[in-house]
Each structure stands twice: as structure tokens, then as C-alpha cells.
Image (spheres, rainbow, N blue to C red):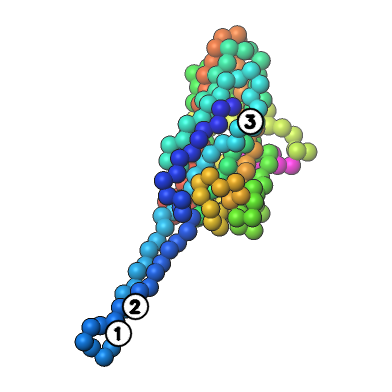
């Protein structure tokens, strides 16, 4: 899978800066002070690692804001089993939902099979506090693989989680959770097909 490249304008996305300056009052026997306070907007960002496995399927990804749209296409009639390594960085609690769209293929399985931290700038309790919707949870590989159709023609909640990143930037190698998605499709008889899977990460404060 072709990996997207993230651009970063502000290299301090996950830090909070506050300064206090003390200014003497000219000609007076007392001092005054000015306090400067700031806040950082809540941020949740999804990105991909280049090590995805899609077999004969052509795959691409486009990131826009807090959403990631995967496009899968092939002319092969064999049902593919696609593994997608997804990185999540956040400075707040969040939810991730999925939406599947295709005029040709049917989504037969969408599962999260692994969740692990990428380094020391990941909050210590983040992995244990990730809450997966049961029908998408396949971290226990002894479970029977889902074979029934997974209906996500409307956005469906896949998981929720706490703040992940303690510092770093949107490209730091050690401040993300890596989620491995497993996608299985049911395909039409021998003809080219196209499918889209859109993942949207929403800060907790914006969840209705």
C-alpha cells in the first residue's frame, strides 16, 4: 500500500505553553505583572504505515483533517484478505468510526486484530483503556473469524480510547498507538471492483 505523507506546520502540536512576565512600573515603588495563558486544540490524527498487505489489490489512502479514506481496487475475482496498520495520535480522548462504500464489493469482515504502543511517548494506560466495539474486536485470535456481512453503510463506532500522545509531533515514531485492521471482502464475478473505507477520528468533546 502506498503510504501517505503527513505535512506538519506546527511542530509542537501536543504541548501547552504558558508564560509569565514581570514588568517593573517606571517611577513607582511597586511592580506589576502580566500573565499569558494559552490552550491547545484537541487533536486526533490517523495515518498509515507502509507495511500493509493487500495481495493483488491496489490500495491508496488520502488523509483530510481527522479522517482517512482508503481506496481498494482490483480486477481479480479472488476475495482478498487485507491487513492495514493504522497509527493513531491524540492529545485527548477520541472515537473512531468506519464507513464502507462500494457498488461492487461487499464488506464481509472488518476487525481489529492488534493494538500496541509505538514508544515511550505513549500514555502508559492507553492500550488497556482502548474500548473496542465487540463485533470489530478480533484481538484474541482463538475467536472464530467473522464471516457474516458487516453492515457499515452508515458510520459505525469501531473503538474509543483515551489520550495517547504525551508529546512529540504528528510524525514522531514513538507517540502513537498502532492498530492492525483486517478487512475481508466478498467480490462480484470476475470484473473490476472499487471499494472505499473511510475512518473518522472524533475528539471526545465533540461526540454528541
Identify the residue under disc 3. Answer: 52
Looking at the rendering, the stretch of residues picked out in magenta corresponds to: 136-140
Q: Earlier in the sequence, mark 3 or mark 1?
A: 1
Identify the residue under disc 1. Answer: 31
Could you classify mark 3 by the number of other residues whose Cα lies within 10 Å: few (under 14), some (14-19), or many (20 or more)?
some
Confirm whether residue 95 shows in the render. Answer: no
Q: Is residue 70 magenta?
A: no
Question: How far from the left and from the top, in percent, is residue 160?
Answer: 56, 49
On screen, 132 above or below 126? above
On screen, 36 above or below 185? below
Q: How many marks?
A: 3
Q: Secondary structure at mark 2?
A: strand
Mark pair 2, 3: CA separation: 54 Å
Is mark 3 in CB contact (under 8 Å) with mark 1? no
Q: Earlier in the sequence, mark 2 or mark 3?
A: 2
- Seen as rendered, the residue at the extreme right is 142
Q: Secondary structure at mark 3?
A: loop
Is mark 1 in CB contact (under 8 Å) with mark 2? yes
Question: Which is nearer the eye, 1 or 159?
Answer: 1
Residue at image position (41%, 67%) is 18
Task: Give the quarter of the image for residue 105.
Answer: top right
Could you classify mark 2 by the number of other residues whose Cα lies within 10 Å: few (under 14), some (14-19), or many (20 or more)?
few
- Seen as rendered, the residue at the extreme top is 190
Question: Which is nearer the eye, 2 or 180?
Answer: 2
Question: How far from the left and from the top, in percent, is residue 20?
Answer: 38, 73
Question: How far from the left and from the top, in percent, is residue 127?
Answer: 65, 52
Question: How far from the left and from the top, in percent, is residue 192?
Answer: 55, 12
Q: Looking at the magenta stretch, what is its main secondary structure?
A: loop
Residue at image position (55%, 57%) is 166
Which numbered disc covers residue 22? 2
Residue at image position (56%, 9%) is 191
Amino acid at each position: 500500500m502506498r503510504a501517505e505523507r503527513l505535512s506538519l506546520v506546527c511542530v509542537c502540536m501536543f504541548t501547552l505553553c504558558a508564560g509569565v512576565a514581570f514588568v517593573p512600573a517606571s517611577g513607582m515603588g511597586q511592580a506589576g505583572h502580566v500573565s499569558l495563558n494559552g490552550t491547545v486544540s484537541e487533536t486526533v490524527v490517523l495515518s498509515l504505515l507502509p507495511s500493509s498487505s493487500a495481495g493483488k489489490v491496489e490500495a491508496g489512502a488520502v488523509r483530510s483533517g481527522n479522517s482517512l479514506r482508503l481506496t481498494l481496487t482490483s480486477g481479480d475475482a479472488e476475495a482478498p484478505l487485507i491487513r492495514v496498520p493504522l497509527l493513531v495520535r491524540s492529545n485527548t480522548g477520541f472515537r473512531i468510526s468506519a464507513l464502507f462504500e462500494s457498488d461492487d464489493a461487499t464488506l464481509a469482515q472488518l476487525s481489529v486484530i492488534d493494538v500496541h504502543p509505538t514508544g515511550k511517548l505513549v500514555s502508559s494506560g492507553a492500550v488497556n483503556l482502548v474500548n473496542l466495539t465487540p463485533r470489530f474486536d478480533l484481538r484474541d485470535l482463538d475467536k472464530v473469524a467473522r464471516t457474516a456481512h458487516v453492515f457499515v453503510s452508515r458510520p459505525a463506532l469501531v473503538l474509543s480510547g483515551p489520550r495517547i500522545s504525551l508529546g512529540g509531533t504528528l510524525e514522531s515514531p514513538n507517540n502513537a498507538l498502532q492498530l492492525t485492521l483486517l478487512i475481508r471482502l466478498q467480490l462480484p464475478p470476475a470484473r473490476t471492483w472499487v471499494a472505499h473505507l473511510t475512518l473518522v477520528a472524533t475528539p471526545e468533546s465533540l461526540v454528541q
